[in-house]
Amino acid sequence: QGSDTDQLQTSFTYNPTSKLSFSASFNRNQSSALETVNESSSRSTQLSAHWAPSDSLSMDLSRSISKTDGRVTSSYYSSFTTAASAFRDGTVDTAITPGGGGTGGDEETETPSSQDINDRLTLNWRPNSKLSCDLSLGRRKYVSTGTQGYLADSNQTSWSLGASWTLSEAMNLNLSVSSDRTEYLDAGEGTVDNRSYVFSTNYRKPGERWGAGLTLNVQDGSSPTYVGTGRLQKSRIVATNLFDVSGQLSYDLKKGITITGSAGISDYSGGYADFRKANAEVKMRYQLSDTTGVDFGYRFIRNVSRLGPDSLIFGTSSSGQNYIANTFSLTLSTNFRGGIGAKGAGMGSSVSSSPGTFGG
C-alpha cells in the first residue's frame, strides 16, 4: 500500500501603480496509488485585483477555481469500501477478499470529479475618520460527478452591507444587513434562504471605570427539512425566524479586578424547534499578573419550548427542549511569550471547573 504525490506551486504579484495591484497563484497536485492504476489530480487557481483610487475608497475583486479528478485508494481498503456499498445496495453475489475485491455489480465508468468556483467583489468607503461602509457581493458554484465531492451540487449567491459610525470617543454604532441563497441543483433538494440584520452599539468613556454594550440580531429565511431515509424520506420547506437581543455591563472595581454582567433573550422558530430562551451571567476577573488571570462566574439559562406533540414536524419528539440550567465556573488562564528580542512564540493554557445543575 501507499501512494506517490507530486506538487507544484507558483505565484506572482504585479503592481503597475501605487494604487493598483494584481496577484495570482497556481497549485497542482498529482497522486497515484503504488499497487493500482488509480490516480487523482487537483488544480487550483486564484486571481485577485486591488484598486484604491483614493484614500477613502478601495475595491477588491477575486476569483478562485479548484478542480479535482479521480480518486486514490489502496486496493486493500477499496475492497472493503466496495463490499460495504454492495451489502448496503443488496448487490453482493461474489465473495470479497482483501486485495482482490469485486462485487459482481456494475463498475463505475465515469471519472469522479468536482469543481468549485468562487467570485467575490468587496468595496470599502471611508468618507471621513468616523464613518466606514462596506459592500460585499459573492457567487459560488459547486458541481461534482461520479460520487465525488464534499458538498451538494449547488449555486450560491450572497451579499452584505455594513456600516460603522464613531459618534464620539465613548460611543460607536455598527449595522449590517446580509443575504445568502443556496440553490441545490439536484431535483427536489430545494433552496436555502437566509437574511440577517444586526445592530450593535458600545459605550465606554476614556478614563471611566464602566462600559456597556447592546446587540440586536434578527434573522429570517427558509430551508428544506428532511426526515427519514431512502424511499421513506420526506421533505418540506420550513420558515426559520430568529430574534436575539443581549446587553452587557462591565465595571473595573479596582486595578486588576473587573466585574461583568450580561443578559439576553432569544426567540426562535423553525422546523425542529420553536423556543424562547433567557440567559444571564455574572463574572468577575481577577488579574493576578500580566500573564495570569482567574475568572469566577455564574450562568443561568431557561429554555421554554412552544412545540407540542401535534405541532412538531412529522411527529418528532419535543422531549428535553424545556430546561433550566445553573452553572458555576472557575477558570485559571495563563499566557506568555518567549523568544529573543521582540520576536517570539506566544503560548497559553487554561484550567476550568464548571459544576452546575440541569433540570426540566
Image (cartoon, rainbow, N blue to C red):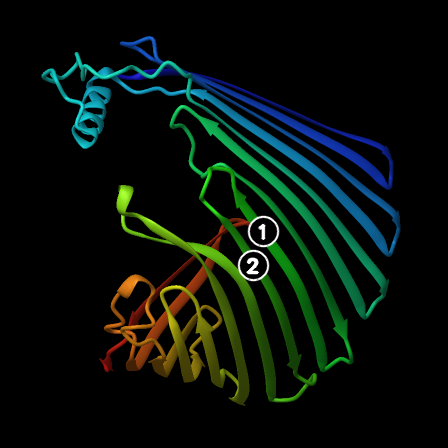
Judging by the rendered image, the residue that carries numbered circle 1 is 181
Q: CA distance from mark 1 to mark 2?
A: 6 Å
Pick the front one: 10 or 242 = 242
Q: Residue at x 26, y 18 (%)?
A: 74
Residue at image point 78% right, 80% down? 168
Q: Quadrant of the C terminus?
A: bottom left
Q: Going 81% across and 70% down the picture, which residue do you hit?
A: 130
- Work out whether 259 lies above or below 90: below
Left or right, 111 with respect to 36, comes to right
How many numbered marks does the figure carry?
Answer: 2
Q: Is residue 342 visible?
A: no
Q: Would residue 55 be seen by someone viewing this image from the given angle?
A: yes
Q: Is residue 9 left or right of residue 314?
A: right
Q: Please, what is the three-letter code of the amino acid marked with disc 2?
A: Asn
Q: In the rendering, at what x and y percent does residue 165 appear?
A: 76, 72
Asked where in the image residue 284 lies, by quadrant, the reply is bottom left
**Image side of residue 257 versus residue 50, left or right:** left
Q: Is residue 4 above or below residue 308?
A: above
**Is label 1 in contact with label 2 (beta carbons under 8 Å)?**
yes
- Per the rendering, the mark at residue 194 is 2
**Does residue 177 lie above or below 116 as drawn?**
below
Circle 1: element type = strand
Q: Quadrant of the N terminus?
A: top left
Task: Work out whether 109 lies above or below 159.
Answer: above
Q: Position of residue 302 (x, y in %)?
A: 35, 83
Residue type at mark 1 is Arg
Q: Residue 173 location, x and y as percent? A: 71, 75
Q: Secondary structure at mark 2?
A: strand
Q: Which residue occupies 45% across, 44% down?
A: 189
Location of residue 179 by image quarter: bottom right
